[in-house]
């Protein structure tokens, strides 16, 4: 009962996280698009930098990008901050529900670093906090843009170096996403909103607002757009262990972050020539696919071509079905994980590629290697699954 309640709680949280995220990223994409689509007004208007017309749902909309001066502030001003905040809150709750509780089994890989649950959670929170302070210090305190960009890239590489050496394959991905997502939210609350609020207050008080706040807010807002694609990819990655295999996940994170940022650049620019960044982004993603395809084929040992189902069945029985059964007997897992039962041949055959990926290549199953699966058993399963997959092609 309590396990199914937990799953429902997680399900509803995930749904809320997704909906809030759509609202946040959706409005962010919309403003990115607006910024690239504005044209100067046909007849110059005071304080108006650009305007555009849209048609949607049978009506026309006119939007102006403008500055506000004393006496011009409208009665109702719409702010965009709750989408970001709700996305982070639901995401953080999900992080707790999926990764921090239950012994933090999904966050820890004892082969990467021997950690207790408390240490893993402490490290996750500590690294996220440190990441923000360093990033914020770089951009807030040091007035040299080239230095800022280089220091930020070094910070990114550091994060991508540290996380895979601290957490499980999947944990390292989610931790990186958590750190980037937190930077995005704090950018909104600590660096974007206060400046905007100050300008509005100045305009209300009849003073000419200090537009240097706009420029500062814009920098952080631009950073947030660079984070979007890597963060989204990372959030989805936990359904695809092909992305977070421990041996390669640092490289994957790097390729994903750089490629995501390049796609974003192509999307934002209003100069078609600058869309060339899509090419290296495509090469980055292709490299990712290539690197993983390579180790996939290496994983089976050809000598084991003769393996029969009778040989692998006891391995599934001993190592998997305490969790992957219609009625699991594991002390923590009470519902069939992801509906994947591995109790008989036909059930096993439904999941061959995932079994190969998770139990043989990524070694992310059995969860936390709770059932002590040996490397020989992984090879045996690998050889059998690969044979079935080639036969069925
Ligand atoms: C201690 C419990 C446990 C054991 C033992 C275990 N698993 Fe899992 N398995 C899980 C959990 C929990 C998930 C769901 C993880 C998630 O939330 O993404 C899972 C997910 C999977 C999935 C992915 C399903 C999907 O669609 O994403 C596969 C495939 C899988 N396990 C295969 C295996 C194999 C093969 C073994 C034995 C070699 C095994 N597992 C042993 C707990 C276990």
Image (tube, helix red, strand yellow):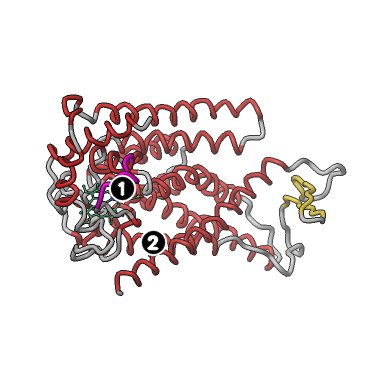
Question: Residue at 26% of width from left, 54% of height from top?
Answer: 106
Magenta stretch: residue 14 in it?
Answer: no
Q: Which residues are magenta?
A: 344-353
Tag 1 residue: 346
Tag 2 residue: 92
With respect to residue 2, does 59 lie above or below? above
Going by the image, does 41 lie left or right of 225? right
Nearer-N-terminus badge (1/2): 2
| Image quarter hosting the N terminus | bottom left
Question: Residue at 32% of width from left, 33% of height from top?
Answer: 389
Report x, y in % for residue 256.
42, 37
Magenta stretch: residue 351 in it?
Answer: yes
Q: Secondary structure at mark 1?
A: helix
Foreground pick, 31 / 113: 113
Report x, y in % for residue 90.
44, 64
Q: Quadrant of residue 111?
A: top left
Which numbered mark, 1 or 2, is in the foreground of this view? 1
Question: Residue at 30% of width from left, 60% of height from top?
Answer: 336
Foreground pick, 370 / 43: 370
With respect to residue 131, does 146 lie above or below? above
Q: Secondary structure at mark 2?
A: helix
Foreground pick, 197 / 282: 282
């Amino acid at each position: 009962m309590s396990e199914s309640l937990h799953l429902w709680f997680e399900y509803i949280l995930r749904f809320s996280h997704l909906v809030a995220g759509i609202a946040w990223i959706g409005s962010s994409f919309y403003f990115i698009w607006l910024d690239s689509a504005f044209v100067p007004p046909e007849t110059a208007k005071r304080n108006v930098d650009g305007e555009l017309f849209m048609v949607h749902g049978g009506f026309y909309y006119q939007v102006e990008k403008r500055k506000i001066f004393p006496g011009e502030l409208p009665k109702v001003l719409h702010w965009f901050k709750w989408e970001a905040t709700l996305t982070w809150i639901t995401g953080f709750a999900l992080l707790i529900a999926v990764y921090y509780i239950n012994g933090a089994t999904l966050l820890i890989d004892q082969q990467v670093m021997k950690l207790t649950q408390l240490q893993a959670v402490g490290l996750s929170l500590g690294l996220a906090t440190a990441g923000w302070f360093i990033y914020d210090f770089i951009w807030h305190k040091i007035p040299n843009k080239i230095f800022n960009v280089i220091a930020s890239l070094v910070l990114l590489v550091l994060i991508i170096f540290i996380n895979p050496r601290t957490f499980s394959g999947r944990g390292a991905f989610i931790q990186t996403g958590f750190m980037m997502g937190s930077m995005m939210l704090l950018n909104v609350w600590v660096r974007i909103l206060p400046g905007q609020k100050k300008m509005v207050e100045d305009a209300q008080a009849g003073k000419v607002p200090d537009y240097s706040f706009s420029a500062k807010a814009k920098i952080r807002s631009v950073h947030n757009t660079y984070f979007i694609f890597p963060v989204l990819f990372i959030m989805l990655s936990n359904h695809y262990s092909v992305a977070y295999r421990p041996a390669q996940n640092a490289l994957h994170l790097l390729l994903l972050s750089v490629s995501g940022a390049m796609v974003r650049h192509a999307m934002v620019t209003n100069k078609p020539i600058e869309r060339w960044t899509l090419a290296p982004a495509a090469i980055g993603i292709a490299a990712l696919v290539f690197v993983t395809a390579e180790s996939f084929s290496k994983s089976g040992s050809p000598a084991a071509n003769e393996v029969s189902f009778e040989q692998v069945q006891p391995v599934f029985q001993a190592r998997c079905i305490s969790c992957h059964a219609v009625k699991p007997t594991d002390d923590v897992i009470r519902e069939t994980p992801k509906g994947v039962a591995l109790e008989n041949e036909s059930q096993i055959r439904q999941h061959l590629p995932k079994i190969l990926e998770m139990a043989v290549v990524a070694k992310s199953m059995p969860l936390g290697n709770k059932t002590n699966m040996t490397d020989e058993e992984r090879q045996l399963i690998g050889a059998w699954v690969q044979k079935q997959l080639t036969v069925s092609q």
